[in-house]
Image (tube, helix red, strand yellow):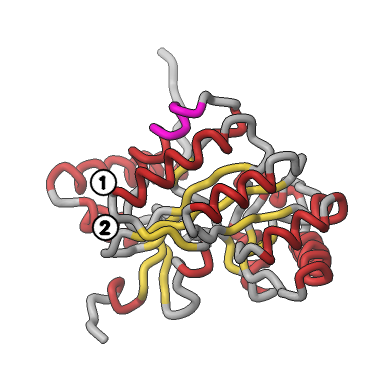
Amino acid sequence: MKLYVVHKDTVIIYSLIAVFIISILTLNWDTAVSVFEVMAPKRDLPIYCVQKEEKICAISFDAAWGNEDTHSLIEILKKYNIKTTFFVVGEWVDKYPESVKELSDAGHEIMNHSNTHPHMTSLSKENMKKEVEECNKKIESVINKKPILFRPPYGDYNDSVVGAMRDIGMYTIQWDVDSLDWKDLDAQTIVNRVTTKVKPGSIVLFHNAAKNTPEALPLILEKLIADGYKIVPVSEIIYKENFTVDPTGRQIPNSVATGSID
């Protein structure tokens, strides 16, 4: 007879999953999330999306590689009068300060994507702060504005990353809609991925220097605008204070989370 040893943590995880699934089937999504919040161990999560009633979403770009399509992206966004957020790596700022300034002058946010694009969870908390603060200094030296948002390279984070960013006054931002443009998907596939997944409060991820993003972007903007969406930079969609982040990464204003009415 074989004996299997099941660790206590494994039992807890599977129990939570079972309760969550049952809650969705028998209750509704919001109730299921509430049940999960009560039972799940508390984690320090970044913001993946935002609780919104109106049709509003944010578009963001990660800039860590080349700058060959930066001007094209600026022109496309200008055509549709859209302002977005560019999360830039400090080393990218070193190579392309003129692109950073052009983006900022066009009205786009320049935010922090680390200095050297490391796996943040491999760093000590002190080195996490140094990595981000060094990038902040480089950005500020070019555009005279200090970033307040940070996106971890590779989407790699843990409680320490989110906590370290909070210590230095930064909001940690992820995404709930991934274009996967870095995989060189064809333009129509990118369009379909994004436009079918966006919902009120979504944060969309694109990449600078991705092969087919300049072709896909106009089609995405036209579809979202036709569907009634207002498209804004990330800092304009998130709440800066009096909020909680639920277990799915959705940022919720405290008035909604507690059921109170201001």
- The verdict on residue 156 being magenta is no
| Quadrant including the C terminus | bottom left
Q: Is residue 98 above or below residue 258?
A: above
- Region in magenta: 187-192
- Residue lying farthest to the bottom in this orientation: 262
Q: Quadrant of residue 246?
A: bottom left
Q: Residues within 10 Å of mark 2 (few under 14, many from 20)?
A: some
- Dot 2 corresponds to which residue? 35
Do the residues under discs 2 and 1 have CB atoms within 8 angstroms? yes
Q: Dot 1: within a 10 Å radius of its alpha carbon, few (fewer than 14), some, or many (20 or more) residues?
A: some
Residue 194 position by quadrant: top left
**Residue at 69 percent of width and 60 percent of height:** 112
Element under label 1? Answer: helix
Indicate the quadrant containing the N terminus: top left, top right, bottom left or bottom right. top left
SS at mark 2 in the image: helix
Q: What residue type is disc 1 on?
A: Val
Pick out the residue farthest to the top: 1
Q: Where does residue 159 sit, x and y in percent of width and height?
A: 59, 59
Say whether residue 250 is visible.
no
Separation of residues labelled 2 and 1 (CA atoms): 8 Å
Q: Which mark is residue 19?
A: 1
Vertical position of residue 255 compared to residue 209: above or below: below
Q: Is residue 189 magenta?
A: yes
Near-viewer residue (233 or 219):
219
Measuring from the top left, give residue 72's x and y in whole percent: 64, 44
